[in-house]
Each structure stands twice: as structure tokens, then as C-alpha cells.
Amino acid sequence: MRAHPTPASAPAHAGLSTGLPTGLSTGLQRRHLLMAGPAALLAAGLPGCASQGGPSASAAPDAGLLAVLAAPHRSEANRARDVFRNPGPTLAFFGIRPTLTVVELSPGGAWYSEILAPYLRASGKLYLAHFPADSANQNMRRSRANFAERMAKAPELYDKAVLATLPTATGAPEVPAGSADLVLTFRNVHNWVSDNSLDDKLRGCFAMLKPGGVLGVVDHRAKPGTSLEAMKKSGYVTEALMEERARAAGFVLAAKSEVNANPKDTADHPNGVWTLPPVFALKDVDRARYAAIGESDRFTHRYVKPA
């Protein structure tokens, strides 16, 4: 069960099983798009919704983004996950454009970074906000150093990108306040819920964004009513919690999309979300069963910093 079931006419993962899918725009139009609040909020032109990433339900990836998604620098393993992560429709929903200043939070294994960096390289700007270089946590320092090495080895992708630091409540030191058009986080919110840093992260995002700027969020979706402790244990987060915390930080929820929904995911697995691919926390135990489910059911929210 999911918080927002996808209509039968809108398959949860249509459109990106191949590099340059036929009918991608049509498939995206069929996605179930839920608008938050009065429809007039967007129609009236809430600051940023039109100029900084407020696409309609029929928005589709532009030619430049499609070209990056099909480019040879992306490994077959990464392309295989497009069917679950839907990068083209997801970024189009957030309003990505090649001239924007974009911040990606906690880029991890660079799955999205290797798409964003070449797309923004010529005309935009990309900050990749990682753990602090002077973190007291050795694993965090090592993770950042490894990411810096990854960037150095692929200057054709990352020479224009800036390795930045995750925001605190006041923003990130490398990202000027009020300079970002778009801040993106993919499957990180559950970690910030677990370490009690979500509120500070969201306030930092608010500080980095221009008035009218967009915060795009994708994360594992918990069933409505799931307790905070259960969220921390399972890695799934309720949409209600995300909306509440974003609102407290000053954001306005502009829209929701079901582009990353997975109706096969019941969100009640023995080892939480990590039971599913790509982690397979149970190793070979029921592996075929979890592989058939695929990656988690995810909510996709677009928030706006009001003028």
C-alpha cells in the first residue's frame, strides 16, 4: 500500500527503460500529479513557480538532458536503475534548466551528479554539497576525499562543479546566500531524520535559495501514521513529516508527483528499506523476491521559497 496510489493508466515506471525512450513526454503526462493547496496558487504565479521551476504535469526532459542520459559516460549499471529513479521526468518536474545554479545535497555515489554536472557545465553552475572536510567522523572525511578524487579523475564532467559542504541552519559556506535556483536531495531525508539534522538542513536550503527558488525532494515513502521511531528504524519517511518540517523552515509545497512511486513496495521489510535493491541487506535470503519488488516506493515533492 502507498500513500498515493498510481492510477492504472499511469504505470509507476513507464518511460525510461531505454536510453532515449519513445513517447516519454506522453508517458510523463500520464503521471499522477498532485497539486498542493489551491490550484490558483501556481496559476497566479507564486514566485518561482513559473520562472524557477514550476512546470506543468506535461513537462518533459529537454534535448540536452536526454542527451546526457544517453551519453557513454554513464555505466550500464547506472542506466539500469533509470527505470526506478526516473531521472529525466524527475528533473523536469523540479524545473531543471541548463542555465540554473543548482546544489545537490549528499551526492553519495554520484549517480545524479554524473547527470547534473555535464548538463549544467556550459551555462549553469553546480555545487555538490558533501560532508565537511574537517568532520570529526573519519568515515565522513574519507567519503568526501573519495568523492573529490572521483571528480578529479573525470574533469570532462566535473571541472566546472564545486565541491561544497552540506548546509547547517545558516547555509553552506561555499554557496552564497540567496544564490541557488534549485536545491536537490535524493534519498537523504531519512538519514537526516535519523540524526535529527533535518530541520537545520532545511533551514540551510532556505538560506541558499533565491526567493522563488525550488527545493526538490525524493525519499522513501512511509505509510501515513508511521511513528518517528519507526521511520528512523526503517528508512521510510511519511510525506506528512516532510511537509511539516519544510513548512516550518519557510517553504511552500508547490506540487507532488508520483513519478517515483512503486506499488510493489509495502514498506514493511525486515531490514527496512535496505532490504530492497540496491543494498539487499538480507544478502541471498529471498533475494529474488526483493529484486522483483525493485527499489523503494518514493515521494517526489517540489517546494518553493516565497518572495
Image: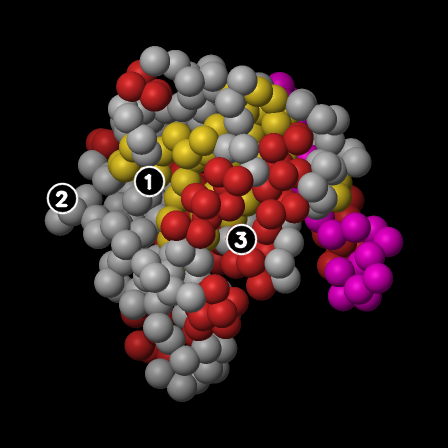
Residues at circles 3 and 1 in contact by the CB criterion of under 8 Å: no
Q: Does residue 98 appear left or right of residue 40 in this picture?
A: right
Kind of residue at disc 1: Ser
Q: Nearer the viewer, mark 3 or mark 1?
A: 3
Q: Does residue 104 appear left or right of residue 18 in this picture?
A: right
**Residue 258 sits in which quadrant?**
top left
Q: Is residue 81 visible?
A: no
Q: Is residue 198 visible?
A: yes
Residue at 45%, 45% (x, y): give it. 244
Kind of residue at disc 3: Val
Separation (CA) of disc 3 from disc 1: 17 Å
Q: Quick one: SS at disc 3? A: helix
Picture layout, residue 205 above or below residue 107: above
Q: Earlier in the sequence, mark 3 or mark 2?
A: 2
Number of residues whose C-alpha sits closer than 10 Å to that of mark 1, classed few (under 14), some (14–19) or many (20 or more) = many
Q: Between 104 and 77, which is closer to the camera in this rendering?
A: 104
Q: Is 126 inside the magenta-drawn segment?
A: yes
Give coordinates of residue 51: x percent, y percent: 47, 15
Magenta range: 122-142
Q: Between 46 and 54, which is closer to the camera in this rendering?
A: 46
Separation (CA) of disc 3 from disc 2: 30 Å
Q: Earlier in the sequence, mark 1 or mark 2?
A: 2
Kind of residue at disc 2: Ser
Q: Residue under circle 2?
A: 9
| Figure quadrant of the C terminus | top right
Q: Residue under circle 3?
A: 189
Q: Does residue 83 appear left or right of residue 196 in this picture?
A: left
Picture layout, residue 32 above or below residue 221: above
Give coordinates of residue 73: x percent, y percent: 57, 44
